[in-house]
Image: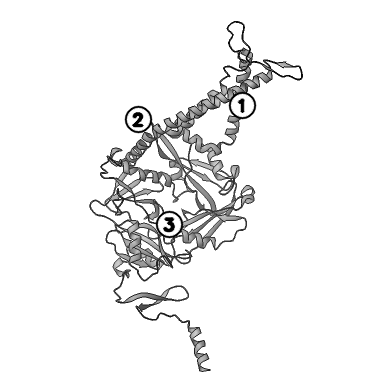
C-alpha cells in the first residue's frame, strides 16, 4: 500500500524533492556519458548504424527516433511508486530510503520498456512510409544527375591493345594460390590494379590467416599477377608489414582505422592493392551521400575521394582532386565501383518514376543492366583499359523486358575522374554477354563444354569502333586459360586466338579479323565428335573425327608395343 499524503491523499513521488530530482538527473547524465564514451571509443563498430541514421531517410526516422525516445525515457523520472516498504525480521523500517528508491525504479522500468516498444512499432511503420517514396526519388534524382553529366559518343572508344584481360579471375586465383607458400598468411580477395610497368594485374593482400595470427600478426604486403598474358605470367610480391591492414582484427585492421579517422564516409569498395617505387600501398575509394529535401527528403551517393594507406600506418584522406593529382595513385582506379553500380541501376528511372512502374508504367525508353548467365564469373561494371592507359568501367545496358537480351546502350566511366560517356545503338541491336557466350560455345561444337572446358568471364572490347565480347576458355578446374574467343556484338562473327601477340595485334587492329581463322562449326557429315591429340604443352596437334558406328578405342602406343611383344613371344 502506498502512503497517502495529508492534503490530497495522492501518491507520494520519491523524487518530488528538488535534491532527489537533481540526484536522478545527475546519475542518468553520468550513465549516458559512460555509454557515449564507450560508443566513441568503439565507434567503428557502430559506423553502419550511425551513418545510416545520418544519410538514410528510413534509418533517420527509425534509428534517430529510437535514440531520441531512449534518451527521453532514460531521463524521465518515475511518476508514481509504491512509497512504503517495510522489511520485517530485523525491526528496521525503510519507507523513503534507498531501497524504496530502487523499488520505484523497478516499477517504472517495466512501464518504460512497454512504452519504448510501442514507440518502436510506430517508428517501423513511419520508416516504411518514408523509405518507399524516398527510394524512388533517390533513383530518379541519381538518374537525372548521371544523364546530365554524361556525353553521348558516336563510336566506341578504342581499347588498349597492350592491356587485354586474357586471364579470368578464377584462373588467376587458382594458379596464384597454388604457386605461393605461406604458413601464417593467405592471399585475400583478388582485385584489379595497375602495375608499375603499366599493365593490368590481379592484386592480393598477403594477410594473416587463422584467429591467433589475425590478432597478433600483420599484413605482409601485396602480391600482383599479370592478367594480360596467357603464358609466362609474372607474379610479383612486394613485402612490407602493414601496421594497419587486411585480415587484421579490431583496432589493428585498416577498416577500423579508416572509419576512426574519417567517420562520415563509407568504404564499400574492396581495397586496390598496388605498388609504387617498389613499396606496397592500399587505396580505398570513399562514398558519401548528399541530401535532397524536395519533393521528399532523400539522398544520393557521391564520390568523396579516397584513403591511401601506407605500410607505416599513415592514412592520407584525399578528396577527388587530390586523389587524381597523387603521384602514388597515378594510373590506378579511383572512382568507387559501388557508386557506378548505383548510377547504372538508376537509369531505369531516367524517364520518370511512373514510366517504370510495373502496372501503369509505359516503360518507354527504359533500360536495365544486362544480365549475365550462370558461369560468367563476372559482374558489371566490367573493368577494362582504354587507349592511353585510361582504366574504365563499362556497363552494357539492355532494353527493359524479361525476354530482352540485345544491347541498347553501352556506358563508360573513367575510373580516375568519374566522367561518363555512352554509346546508343539506336535502331541496331548488339549482342549481349549472355548471347555472346552461347555463340562462343555453339561455334565450336567439338569441345566438350561443361565436362572438360567452360567459357567464362566475358568482357567488352572496343576495336576500330566496333564492340566485341572477349570470352575466355578454361578447363573446368580453372588451372589454365587455353584460348580467348572474340564475338562481334554486331555481326556475331567469332574468332578464337591462342597467342598473346595475336590478341594484341587483333585488338590494335593491325591484323584484320578476316586474316584470322574464325571459329566455325564445319559441315562434317556423320562426324559424331572429335578426339583431340595434344602435345606436352597442351596444344592441339591433331583432330581425329569419329563417325557414327566407328570404333573409338584409344590405345596408348606403349601398351600396343607391349602387346605386340607378348604376341610375338
The local crowd at label 1, few if under 14, some if 14 to 19, many if 20 or more residues have their Cα within 10 Å, is few
Look at the image and tell me whether residue 325 can be seen: yes
Position of residue 556 relative to residue 342, above or below, is below
User: Residue 173 placed where, x, y %?
Assistant: 50, 59
Position of residue 497 relative to residue 339, above or below, is below
Query: What is the distance, in whole Å, between disc 1 and disc 3 at their CAs?
Result: 52 Å
- Judged left or right of residue 446, residue 89 is right
> Depth check: 14 or 487 in front?
14
Residue picked out by circle 1: 31
Element type at mark 1: helix
Q: Residue at x 52, y 42 (%)?
A: 316
User: Residue 396 placed where, x, y %?
Assistant: 34, 52
Q: Residue at x 38, y 56 (%)?
A: 373
Position of residue 325 relative to residue 43, above or below, is below
Residue picked out by circle 3: 377
User: Residue 534 placed where, x, y %?
Assistant: 44, 75
Would you identify the image quadrant in which residue 150 lies?
Answer: top left
Give the mark, 1 or 2, whose residue is nearer the N terminus: 1
Q: Which mark is residue 146?
A: none
Return the residue found at the far left.
427
Residue picked out by circle 2: 294
Amino acid at each position: 500500500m502506498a502512503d497517502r499524503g495529508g492534503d490530497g491523499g495522492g501518491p507520494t513521488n520519491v523524487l518530488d524533492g528538488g535534491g532527489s530530482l537533481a540526484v536522478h538527473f545527475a546519475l542518468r547524465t553520468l550513465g549516458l556519458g559512460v555509454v557515449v564514451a564507450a560508443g566513441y571509443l568503439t565507434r567503428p563498430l557502430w559506423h553502419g548504424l550511425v551513418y545510416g541514421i545520418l544519410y538514410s531517410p528510413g534509418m533517420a526516422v527509425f534509428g534517430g527516433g529510437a535514440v531520441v525516445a531512449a534518451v527521453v525515457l532514460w531521463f524521465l523520472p518515475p511518476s508514481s511508486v509504491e512509497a512504503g516498504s517495510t522489511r520485517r525480521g530485523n525491526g528496521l523500517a525503510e519507507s523513503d530510503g534507498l531501497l524504496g528508491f530502487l523499488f520505484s525504479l523497478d516499477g517504472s522500468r517495466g512501464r518504460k520498456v512497454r512504452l519504448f516498444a510501442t514507440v518502436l512499432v510506430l517508428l517501423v511503420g513511419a520508416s516504411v512510409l518514408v523509405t518507399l517514396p524516398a527510394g524512388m526519388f533517390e533513383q530518379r534524382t541519381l538518374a537525372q544527375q548521371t544523364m546530365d553529366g554524361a556525353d553521348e559518343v558516336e563510336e566506341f572508344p578504342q581499347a588498349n591493345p597492350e592491356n587485354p584481360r586474357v586471364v579470368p579471375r578464377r584462373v588467376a586465383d587458382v594458379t596464384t594460390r597454388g604457386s605461393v607458400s605461406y604458413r601464417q598468411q593467405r592471399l585475400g580477395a583478388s582485385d584489379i590494379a595497375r602495375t608499375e610497368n603499366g599493365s593490368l594485374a590481379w592484386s592480393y593482400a598477403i594477410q594473416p590467416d587463422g584467429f591467433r595470427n589475425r590478432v597478433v600478426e600483420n599484413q605482409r604486403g601485396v602480391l600482383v599477377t599479370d592478367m594480360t598474358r596467357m603464358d609466362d605470367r609474372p607474379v610479383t610480391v612486394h613485402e612490407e608489414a602493414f601496421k594497419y591492414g587486411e585480415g587484421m582484427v579490431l583496432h589493428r585492421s585498416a577498416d577500423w582505422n579508416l572509419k576512426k579517422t574519417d567517420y562520415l564516409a563509407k568504404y564499400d569498395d574492396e581495397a586496390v592493392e598496388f605498388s609504387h617505387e617498389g613499396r606496397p600501398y592500399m587505396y580505398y575509394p570513399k562514398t558519401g551521400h548528399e541530401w535532397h529535401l524536395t519533393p521528399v527528403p532523400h539522398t544520393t551517393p557521391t564520390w568523396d575521394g579516397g584513403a591511401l594507406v601506407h605500410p607505416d600506418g599513415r592514412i592520407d584522406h584525399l578528396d577527388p582532386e587530390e586523389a587524381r593529382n597523387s603521384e602514388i595513385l597515378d594510373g590506378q582506379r579511383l572512382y568507387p565501383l559501388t557508386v557506378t553500380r548505383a548510377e547504372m541501376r538508376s537509369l531505369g528511372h531516367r524517364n520518370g518514376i511512373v514510366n517504370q512502374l510495373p502496372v501503369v508504367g509505359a516503360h518507354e525508353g527504359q533500360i536495365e543492366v544486362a544480365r549475365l548467365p550462370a558461369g560468367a564469373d563476372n559482374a558489371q561494371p566490367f573493368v577494362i583499359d582504354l587507349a592511353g592507359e585510361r582504366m574504365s568501367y563499362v556497363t552494357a545496358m539492355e532494353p527493359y523486358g524479361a525476354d530482352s537480351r540485345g544491347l541498347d546502350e553501352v556506358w563508360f566511366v573513367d575510373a580516375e575522374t568519374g566522367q561518363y560517356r555512352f554509346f546508343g545503338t539506336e535502331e541496331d541491336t548488339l549482342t549481349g554477354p549472355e548471347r555472346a557466350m552461347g555463340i562462343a560455345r555453339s561455334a565450336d561444337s567439338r569441345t566438350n563444354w561443361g565436362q572438360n572446358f567452360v567459357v567464362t568471364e566475358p568482357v567488352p572490347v572496343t576495336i576500330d569502333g566496333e564492340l566485341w565480347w572477349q570470352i575466355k576458355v578454361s578447363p573446368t578446374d580453372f588451372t589454365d586459360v587455353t584460348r580467348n574467343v572474340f564475338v562481334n556484338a554486331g555481326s556475331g562473327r567469332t574468332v578464337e586466338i591462342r597467342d598473346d601477340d595475336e590478341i594484341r595485334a587483333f585488338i590494335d587492329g593491325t591484323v584484320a579479323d578476316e586474316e584470322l581463322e574464325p571459329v566455325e562449326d564445319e559441315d562434317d557429315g556423320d562426324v559424331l565428335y572429335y578426339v583431340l591429340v595434344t602435345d606436352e604443352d597442351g596444344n592441339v596437334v591433331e583432330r581425329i573425327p569419329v563417325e557414327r558406328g566407328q570404333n573409338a578405342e584409344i590405345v596408348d602406343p606403349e601398351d600396343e608395343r607391349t602387346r605386340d611383344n607378348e604376341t610375338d613371344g
